[in-house]
Amino acid sequence: MILENTCILLHGDGALALERSRISSGDMESGSVLLRMIAAEVCGTDVHLKHRRLDTVPYPIIPGHVAVGRVVAMVGSVRDVDGMQIEEGAVVTYLDVIDTCNSCVSCLVDKESTRCPKRRVLGITCRADPRDVKGLLGGWSSHIYLPPNTKIIRLPEVLPPRVFMAGGCGLPTALHAIERAGIKLMDRVLVQGSGPVGLLAALLARLSGALQVIVTGAPEHRLEVVKRFGIDSTVNIEKAAPSERVAIVRDLTNGRMADVVIEVTGRPEAIPEGMSFCRDGGTYVVVGQYTNNGDAVVNPHHLINRKHLTVKGCWGSDFSHFYKGVQLMAKHVDLPWDSVISQTVRLGDVEKALLQVEKLGIFKALVEEPEAEKAS
Amino acid sequence: MILENTCILLHGDGALALERSRISSGDMESGSVLLRMIAAEVCGTDVHLKHRRLDTVPYPIIPGHVAVGRVVAMVGSVRDVDGMQIEEGAVVTYLDVIDTCNSCVSCLVDKESTRCPKRRVLGITCRADPRDVKGLLGGWSSHIYLPPNTKIIRLPEVLPPRVFMAGGCGLPTALHAIERAGIKLMDRVLVQGSGPVGLLAALLARLSGALQVIVTGAPEHRLEVVKRFGIDSTVNIEKAAPSERVAIVRDLTNGRMADVVIEVTGRPEAIPEGMSFCRDGGTYVVVGQYTNNGDAVVNPHHLINRKHLTVKGCWGSDFSHFYKGVQLMAKHVDLPWDSVISQTVRLGDVEKALLQVEKLGIFKALVEEPEAEKAS
Amino acid sequence: MILENTCILLHGDGALALERSRISSGDMESGSVLLRMIAAEVCGTDVHLKHRRLDTVPYPIIPGHVAVGRVVAMVGSVRDVDGMQIEEGAVVTYLDVIDTCNSCVSCLVDKESTRCPKRRVLGITCRADPRDVKGLLGGWSSHIYLPPNTKIIRLPEVLPPRVFMAGGCGLPTALHAIERAGIKLMDRVLVQGSGPVGLLAALLARLSGALQVIVTGAPEHRLEVVKRFGIDSTVNIEKAAPSERVAIVRDLTNGRMADVVIEVTGRPEAIPEGMSFCRDGGTYVVVGQYTNNGDAVVNPHHLINRKHLTVKGCWGSDFSHFYKGVQLMAKHVDLPWDSVISQTVRLGDVEKALLQVEKLGIFKALVEEPEAEKAS
Amino acid sequence: MILENTCILLHGDGALALERSRISSGDMESGSVLLRMIAAEVCGTDVHLKHRRLDTVPYPIIPGHVAVGRVVAMVGSVRDVDGMQIEEGAVVTYLDVIDTCNSCVSCLVDKESTRCPKRRVLGITCRADPRDVKGLLGGWSSHIYLPPNTKIIRLPEVLPPRVFMAGGCGLPTALHAIERAGIKLMDRVLVQGSGPVGLLAALLARLSGALQVIVTGAPEHRLEVVKRFGIDSTVNIEKAAPSERVAIVRDLTNGRMADVVIEVTGRPEAIPEGMSFCRDGGTYVVVGQYTNNGDAVVNPHHLINRKHLTVKGCWGSDFSHFYKGVQLMAKHVDLPWDSVISQTVRLGDVEKALLQVEKLGIFKALVEEPEAEKAS
């Protein structure tokens, strides 16, 4: 089968190139799957990728790490993790992390598979080639190639692709953060950051039985979205100086401060502030320092030692987070997910959406391709 | 019974005053115990106390938080934690932390009793009065008053007071640090700091089944003591620049770095260095930032988030650490504890010992009072 | 102040005696509090007490371990765990467990305070004496004496006494069980037992973010109450043989079985069945074997070893569970608690309610005393 | 290369057949390794295999799950878990568990890889065929075939094969049990069972810093071996009735009972006894119920619920246990391992050794093949 493909290529020079090519499904490897893209995400990582802020990205790449698509071709029998056969025509999503080796010390001894050195991420650390079906390794493409052993999940019927994408790549990250946080029933939880991952972390804290969930962040339109998800309180950091914020959190928590604080800001200066939001003996989870934005200045006597604090870094996510993310979205399909997807664009307009994401002008954007546009 | 007492008083002006007084055991409270001091410790905290480096110390105080003594008087029936009656003439030690309330949110809900606001420490945060038997609240005194409900342990017969004091106040702290560290059989452990707590943390790591234990510290004479306790390797930080040290640790661990690093230095700059000694997914325990020595500068992307690090502050210790410390010393009485006690002085000479401790000129000093010097 | 008191006394001969007496608040100890009872519970434990099924009960006792009352007298200043002064006229509840010693090995070293040998429970293991105010140590009494150091909590204004009592004594137990279970977001949870604790454990599992909650139990009217609390599925054990139940649970969980099973039945034969409801590597919490009802027969190869199961016994509860229980009820006051309280009686009619509880004829009964009946 | 092979084949009829065959290394798969056997184990599992006591064994098999051999052939480049190239002539061992899929719910979501349904064990659940090099899937064979992706470790030079085999297959199991037990410094540990796994579990408890280690078992010659490894006390169960044993353990532990008890007996009746050896709030690990030997009768009120016990089943082991086992043996090469290996036989005499193992007449037997017997 010969297919017409359209994709966005990043060469690492800051420009987005729309590439059209003809590919052949005959070049697919045994065990691989080819999807027709239904929806892919435009997220903050894509801003970093555009500006070459991540190490070791093998440009050119096709951005878009989490996506949903319809199976248009596969070679041999492919099964999902529950042992069910994947079939042509099925609407599926997949874990964007591939090649975790299960053969190294990180995978087998330390059991920290997110630190496996072989690990690659579709749409981020996989070199793309639009002329070869095997090079369609990213979501901003009308077709997406899933190499052999990609972990695939069929989307439950109750879960529309667009709702699933409202969780998107932030959901496994947020689930991993919540797992690291070890939230217990009746914990007070504060989330620093009101972007997609911040919203989801706050929501998951609420669903985990938190007594109270507070989100600090900005701008106001993002906090408005957060509030629609049943979060108890928000603090707009553009309207309160750091010292005021500590006082506000003290008030909101009746002087107790938070049992658990989750950082999802990307700003180093958020670290000491977040520690000061924790109660003595509390837990602080650092999720948002995905890129190097400089140093944090921390007083270890006051904020770590004397506070008897537990701080947990949280890197990436594994299949369990992705799997549970699908279950969670299917269970909570009735939440106001529409308010999360601020903008939906076609592939040709993705740059506009990316600029909006960069300016925090919108909450989240999706690329969608109408399914009618059939391949020949 | 009227007793002659000699003690050292700190008024908070940097001077040590030798005070002689007559006290009456008739003024003791019901449930209290009076000890004749056998041995008390001179430790780094006493240097801080002399220089007024700790907050909220209610000067004047009698320093000396951990001590061993012989029971000379008691009012009513007093039992140890195993339910055994304390008897006159018994050689005992005691938990220096008193007044933990078991009635506040820290004690009862958070279960972080070392953060109980009512908690006081004999020899540190108890105001002393040498004219009143109830004011003999520190170890640098020929008699020590243990208020009602002080947790007392009879020293096992196999455990000489001087050996117990070689563990001293550092041992419960080190046991707490090891508990926070969660060391598992075959972990690689690195301890930053070669003072009494550093030595003990390294020893406890070895006894917990570490594959390998490394200590970084200085000066050399302290590292010499550390080596006598079966520690695999030491790194003299006066002889290697920070960047060299990372390379040395990488070599020593066959490129794996440490599963667990325990900081016992008191220096903020040790924090980022210690984090860089950890493997990805490792654990970093911060114990040594007992006083405020300024800020640490940490890159949260490289050292926390991407490293998937777990950092644990560790404050104080509770009765379980103290209790297990006595058991541990009784079990390991044959280790070269003599090499730890560099100097033994009488009360009148404690200032000399304190100066040596301040200069790191010695490993550890004890105050001892000969038992023959009986009270009238 | 002289008060007229009415209470129910159990002498251990199976009979309930209504006792009237005059008591004097002048006999109260310093730090004690006297309540006018508003509501007290009639629970399954009271059935055991009537039939002398518990060891070491020092009859006569006044049953009723958890209750709500209004402060009518106190001696000296009494503070709650948050440090707030308790005032006359306040509506309060209290931890029924008193005298936990915080001085023994269980309390201080093992940190298993629910196994402290000094621990007594109001309404269960406290000998009562209706002629002495200090002997009013149970809830089935118009006045309840809270000895010094009883842990008291003021009921939040949003939380009516009757709603709080719908949680009642089962709530701390259920919170303890949930803590032992370590439920994580998206776990499948099964609860064996549909009485008050079973209902609450299932509810708490739901509030902790379980993907799915299943309750097995009987009779049907109890399962009807359970369903009103948003539990996903119930299995009536009177209508399905044991082998069928395993098949039903397999179906309900898509072949996965439960990540966590919580036993709240009191029946030994529930143990092997509950283990078979767990997935490999799952967790089984045993809460319901509060009295000795005989042996369980378990195949350790199939059900423990090969299944890689974790089994956790759960005894009693501590202050943290009680404290969080009050917070939880205040947060979830809008749940259909009315359906839990099947019957409300005056003290004189408590025997009728007790018979209904014994026959499982009702879900739960309360004793209430109208507040207008003022003391002279 | 054509090689002469000799192996022992079990057909499942209780007989051991010595098979000679000629095999060709040309039939090996890419990524596979062929070993010349140096030493293989004769263990209790082999007794079960002879008597067909395990489910789902695909007879015929070549027994011998853990072994050491020298690499005589390999196809392509094979690396160990540390990334080092495996070379011809190297002395290696390997994880006997193969085919763990890393693609199913057990592997990826539950993270219980020892319950992966695809998992097979060399020497136990791999069908053998002596005429095909790919069928040499067990240790009782002059050559052993390691299929692609078998996890291989080069034996450190300090570690002689015979010393490593003294740990043998019991060591990963014991390490897994110790991990499940969560032993902490100063825990009192009791091990039920004095066979190879019992000895190792007791040793690992000692190396983990246990205050005290007690082993209950029989016959006396096995307890004698245990004592040589520094175990504090042994209790011969042939010389003390069950009720006496509880009293003995109470005495040995000063009335405290054990913090952790590890069962390695294979006898169901050991379960309630082992639970009664635990302190309230203690941990009980069930390792020895590897085959179905019938039911255990347990009083859940006394032994689980009221005791607030934690019980942990422990199935199989994974690569981390195997990897750490090699490190541990290399570190502790000076322990009296000679006393563990009671008998060494050639392949032709393995039945005699197996009979001795079955009668508990010896501690442990090895099959060894002199390396001089070179292949043609």
Image: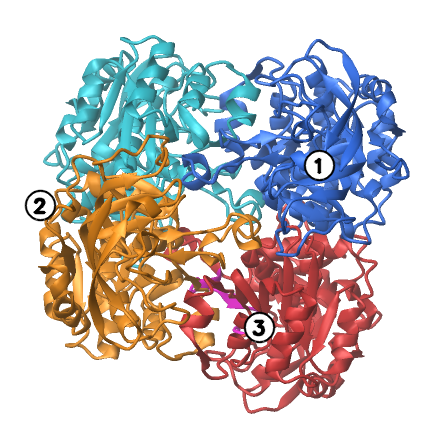
Chain colours: A blue, B cyan, C red, D orange
Q: Marks 1 and 3: CB-CB under 8 Å?
A: no
Q: Which residues are magenta?
A: C114-127
Q: Nearer the viewer, residue A344 or D133?
A: D133
Q: Which residue is mark 2?
A: D372
- On screen, residue B349 versus residue A101, left or right, reads left
Residue type indicated by callout 3: Gly
Among the 4 quarters of the image, the one containing residue A179: top right
Q: Nearer the viewer, residue A224 or C328?
A: A224
Residue appearing at x 52%, y 73% in the figure: C125
Give the answer, above or below, for where A153 lies relative to C273: above
Q: Which mark is residue A25?
A: 1
Whether residue A60 is visible to the viewer of this picture, yes or no, is: yes
Q: Secondary structure at mark 1?
A: helix
Among the 4 quarters of the image, the one containing residue C263: bottom right
Residue appearing at x 24%, y 21% in the figure: B234
Residue type indicated by callout 2: Ala
